[in-house]
Image (tube, helix red, strand yellow):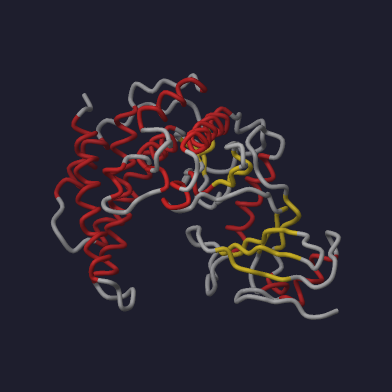
């Protein structure tokens, strides 16, 4: 058997044996890293007969709670099998770090397309992109309507106080990272903290639900929802607001997002589509939109601060400026949304 190609973070020989014990493998396995995602590493795995799988593992050098991270993702995807929310079929979870240096899990490969960039989206027929947006919203509503106890995730995370915990966490992150005066961020935090709506039950919050975190079918339907590493339980309207915020061109600064291409549903259309699939009350959606933009401002300020401090290497000054300006734009939009709150 000839040796397959490998990649950093992959012990090809050891994984070859692991795979052969679980699936039909034809010849040597090749491993290729997929670019994208937040932190966990994703690899396509192929054999000599074009059999395909996907492997997920923690980032290199990540030593804290690695098994926990992988076990969480594995548990979510396994629980959602047959739920009506499309997810890949799980092959197996390995928590024995002797196999590949860290825990990992393997899924079946789901064919389809990932619309990652604005150019990817703009190359599509606007009608098709519109169907993709509609399917995304329908699947999100389906996820949010699942009974967390019925799918076996009732004890997956804390069920209440999601927004309060998020407000506390991201204010702290902002204060630790920022080196400039952006009063809107703290002002919006105080306004939001005093007006948190009552959580409408408990649901599964994906945490990063958007077009490029799903595999799409050629007909525009969602083939599989991916990237579950931020998933938790809590207030699902935070997911909806984040999806709407992501499609707001003002929040993108001068970066063209895939959700801003012609044909993708506008923020008002996303809201209307969700309302047509869910019985949840959207009366307080402005609160969640303010929260979504505010949280992104806190996150991007951390990125800006790292670039400004020079810890990201030889960063393009124009890119650094962009991050800084985007924070200010996000802070203004969050303040605008918060200003509509009673």
For residue 53, side relative to residue 189 (left or right): right
| For residue 30, above or below residue 174 | below
Q: How many numbered marks appear?
A: 0
| For residue 61, above or below residue 247 | below
In the image, farthest residue toward the bottom: 2
Residue 256 in the image: state x and y as whole percent: 34, 51
Q: Nearer the viewer, residue 151 or 290?
A: 290
Q: Nearer the viewer, residue 116 or 238?
A: 116
Q: Residue drawn at (36%, 32%), measured in percent from left and top? A: 267
Q: Nearer the viewer, residue 215 or 87?
A: 215
Q: Residue drawn at (41%, 43%), measured in percent from left and top? A: 259
Which quarter of the picture shows residue 56?
Answer: bottom right
Residue 84 in the image: state x and y as whole percent: 66, 32
Q: Residue drawn at (51%, 39%), measured in percent from left and top? A: 233
Q: Residue drawn at (27%, 37%), measured in percent from left and top? A: 193
Residue 86 in the image: state x and y as whole percent: 64, 39
Residue 164 in the image: state x and y as whole percent: 35, 40
Q: Quadrant of the C terminus?
A: top left
Q: Nearer the viewer, residue 320 or 238?
A: 320
For residue 302, side relative to residue 27 (left or right): left
Q: Quadrant of the N terminus?
A: bottom right
For residue 183, side relative to residue 105 (left or right): left
């Amino acid at each position: 058997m000839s040796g397959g190609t490998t990649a950093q973070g992959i012990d090809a020989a050891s994984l070859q044996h692991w795979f052969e014990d679980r699936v039909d493998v034809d010849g040597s396995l090749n491993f290729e890293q997929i670019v994208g995602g937040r932190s966990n590493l994703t690899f396509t795995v192929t054999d000599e007969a074009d059999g395909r799988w996907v492997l997920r593992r923690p980032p290199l050098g990540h030593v804290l709670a690695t098994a926990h991270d992988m076990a969480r993702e594995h548990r979510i995807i396994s629980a959602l099998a047959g739920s009506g929310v499309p997810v890949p079929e799980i092959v197996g979870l390995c928590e024995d770090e002797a196999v590949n240096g860290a825990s990992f899990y393997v899924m079946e490969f789901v064919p389809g397309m990932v619309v990652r960039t604005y150019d990817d989206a703009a190359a599509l027929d606007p009608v098709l992109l519109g169907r993709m947006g509609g399917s995304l919203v329908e699947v999100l509503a389906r996820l949010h309507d699942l009974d967390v106890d019925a799918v076996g995730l009732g004890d997956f995370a804390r069920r209440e106080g999601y927004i309060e915990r998020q407000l506390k966490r991201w204010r702290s992150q902002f204060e630790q990272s920022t080196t400039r005066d952006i009063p809107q961020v703290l002002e919006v935090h105080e306004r939001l903290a005093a007006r948190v709506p009552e959580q409408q039950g408990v649901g599964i919050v994906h945490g990063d639900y958007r077009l490029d975190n799903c595999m799409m079918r050629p007909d525009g339907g969602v083939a599989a929802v991916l990237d579950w590493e931020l998933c938790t339980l809590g207030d699902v309207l935070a997911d909806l607001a984040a999806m709407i915020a992501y499609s707001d061109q003002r929040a993108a600064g001068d970066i063209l997002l895939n959700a801003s291409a012609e044909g993708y549903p506008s923020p008002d259309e996303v809201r209307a589509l969700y309302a047509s699939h869910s019985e949840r009350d959207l009366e307080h959606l402005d609160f969640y939109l303010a929260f979504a933009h505010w949280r992104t401002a806190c996150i991007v300020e951390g990125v800006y601060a790292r670039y400004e401090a020079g810890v990201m290497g030889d960063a393009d000054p124009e890119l650094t400026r962009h991050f800084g300006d985007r924070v200010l734009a996000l802070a203004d939009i969050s303040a605008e949304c918060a200003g509509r709150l009673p």
